[in-house]
Each structure stands twice: as structure tokens, then as C-alpha cells.
Image (spheres, rainbow, N blue to C red):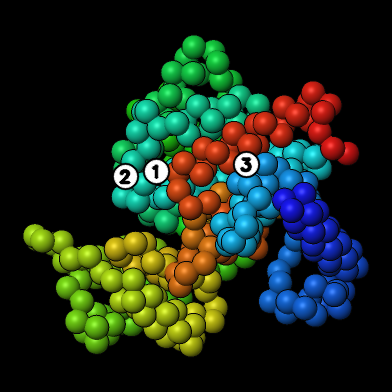
Amino acid sequence: MARTSHQRYVEIMRDVEALINDHIAHQNRNTASRSKLKLLVPTVGTFFTPLLLAEAFAYQDQRRRISSRRFVPPSFNDIRLTLNSAQIMSLVRLGPLHLVTFDGDVTLYDDGDSLTAGNPVIPRILGLLGRGINVAIVTAAGYTESEKYHARLYGLLDAMRVAVIEGRLEKPGLVVMGGESNYLFVFNSEVEYCLESVPRHLWLLDAMRLWSEEEIAALLDVAEAALKECVSTLGLSAEVLRKERAVGIIPSTGAPVQKFTREQLEETVLVTQQVVDMSPAGKRIPFCAFNGGNDIFVDIGDKSWGVLACQRYLGGIQGSQTLHIGDQFLSAGANDFKARLACTTAWIASPAETVDLLDELAFHGKERADGSGGA
């Protein structure tokens, strides 16, 4: 029975593969709106690479025993991990992979934590850098000081400094993009906190240069008013925090700290998103309203702009040569979702899954180098 089920699932994956390949062919002819997949799924976006779904399912089936289950059908997580594997396989086979970008919270470390020295993701990231693959951490945390990013990422940054001093890493290509797309820092082992701020004029995209300070301030004013209205309407024990390029609400200071409910967070995100969308400034300036787990912020720009800026700063890397790894792709205020506009993506659910994904990337890379992978 398991063999029959496996074969059926593989055939389904091959059919979906064919639909995606047809859509990519239409993309290349600028006729994506007429692809079979677009007709079946009108909201489908851009594919930067083919997806090796049949092979990916076989790979995941060996690990998750999907075909061997009698009563539980393929789950959402089965499909999510199969898609991740399909994307990894495609990047390795069709590469080269030049850039891996990461979200912070829930991707590299638990929500609200820091990247400590014992985190198992650190040697995996060092492995990427050692193979000449650039790394960018694209985070919602919007700090203007390198010291604050070092406090969140010190385990990785200090390990990189040691590796450079010992000669195990040469000129590692690591950058940190903060505030979604607002502050760029580059790794430098010779400065105190291992990160050096990059002036905006050296990395801003041409379209970003058109965002005037007046329009940015106007958008944040609208967002701040919408957030204050939500605090009043929903009776939230929250205070507004205004920054240079963001505005948000956080739990009121003092004990005990209130834990906002999922419904309160999502309602506030959706209301704020709609209000800003309808404003004149919101029609001119890209922004991201996102749920941070126990806070809500509206940032200027979003992760698609952040990833695109990193690609340009690192030498003009293409979306088909970039992988963004993050956890927020589904719920209201999911800020990794926009990264799909800039590059290929992998959807993880925990830091442990990030480690597994990087191990899988290394495994398929070694498999290809050894000549044992597929065509």
C-alpha cells in the first residue's frame, strides 16, 4: 500500500511541477497571466526557479513516512517542508547560490531571545560563509547603533571575528539589514561591535531615493493615529513608540507585562494596514504593518526592499541566486511574505528547522559535488 501511495503522490507532484514549468515559460514570454497555473490559482506570484517537487517529495517521504500513514493524509507541514526541499534542490542543481538571507526571531533564535554562542545555527552560517556564500540578516529590529545589533547577534559576530583572526574565514560577506529595509550594517572584524554602518547613499535602490522625508513622516503620522485608535477601541494596555522610520505599540511598562491576544494583534494589524493603505502617503510610500508576537510596528519599506537592497549592495545578486529563510508567511502581519517578491524563499517554523534546512542545503550541495545527485 505504501508503495502505491508513494507513486500516486509522486505523480501528483510531477503534474504540479509541469504546471510551474509552464508558468515559468509564460513568465519568460511576458504572458504569465495566460498560464494554466494562473488560471487555476489567480493569486500565484513569480517563480524565480523551477521546483523539483517529485524528487523533494521522495526525499521528505523517506524522513516523514508520509506514504506509510494509513489514516493521516499529507499535512500542511508535509507540504511546506516538501516545498522547502524542492527549492533547495533547485538552487543547488541550477545555482549558483550567492546569498542566503535570514529573519531573526523564530528563525535564528526563539522569539525575543538573542543569537547566543551555543546556538547550533552558528557553525552552519560559518559554513555558508566559508563556501563563499553571502549572508544577510534582514530583521524588523530597527536600530541605528551597531551595539544593539551586536547584543542580539553576538554569538555569530564574535564567532566570525575569531574565525577571521584564525584565518578560517577571509573577507566574509555578512550584512545586517535593520528595520526591514532602513539600516544597513556590514561585518568588520576590526571594529568594536563587528558591524559598521553603511551610509544610505551607498545602498539605497533608485526607487527608494524617491521617498521624501515629508511623505515618510506623513505615513508614520497616519499609522500612529490608527494604532492609537486601536489601543482605545480594543482596550489595550499599550504605549506608542515612535522611531525615525517606524511607529508601533508595545505593552505598557510596569509589571505585570500584558500578553496581547492573537485576535487583538491581528485586528490591530489589519485595521492599521487598511487605514494607511487608504491614505495619500500610503499610496506613495511602501510600508509593512506586522505582528511581532507581542507588539505591532509599521515600518517604512518591507523585506522585499530589504532583500533587494542587500542583493544590490553585495554586487547585483539575482533573485534566482538568493534564498530567504523566515517563519512569517501566513498570518496577518507576516513580514517575511513580501520577500517572495525579491527571491526564492523557505518557510520554517522554528530555529531547529532552520538548522535542519541548512544541513539539507549542505547535504544536497555535497551530493552534487560528489556527482551522485540527479540531473
Question: Regarding mark 2 in the picture, which secondary structure is present there?
Answer: loop
Density class for disc 2 (Cα within 10 Å; few <14, some 14-19, many ≥20) is few
Question: Regarding mark 3 in the picture, which secondary structure is present there?
Answer: helix
Q: Position of residue 19 (x, y in %)?
A: 84, 66
Q: How many marks?
A: 3
Pick the residue in front: 35 or 30.
35
Q: Quadrant of the C terminus?
A: top right
**Residue at 77 percent of width and 78 percent of height:** 40
Q: Disc 1 residue type? A: Tyr
* Residue matched to label 2: 113
Q: Position of residue 322 (x, y in %)?
A: 67, 47
**Label 3 close to label 2 by CB (< 8 Å):** no
Q: Position of residue 186 (x, y in %)?
A: 50, 38
**Label 2 close to label 1 by CB (< 8 Å):** yes
Between the residue at mark 1 and the residue at mark 3, the CA separation in whole angstroms equals 24 Å
Q: Position of residue 284 (x, y in %)?
A: 55, 78
**Residue at 71 percent of width and 72 percent of height:** 44
* Residue matched to label 1: 109
263 sits left or right of 280 in the view: left
* Residue matched to label 3: 63
258 sits left or right of 331 in the view: left
Between the residue at mark 2 and the residue at mark 1, the CA separation in whole angstroms equals 6 Å
The relative height of residue 286 versus residue 232 in the rendered view (above or below) is: above
Between the residue at mark 3 and the residue at mark 2, the CA separation in whole angstroms equals 30 Å
The relative height of residue 286 versus residue 70 in the rendered view (above or below) is: below
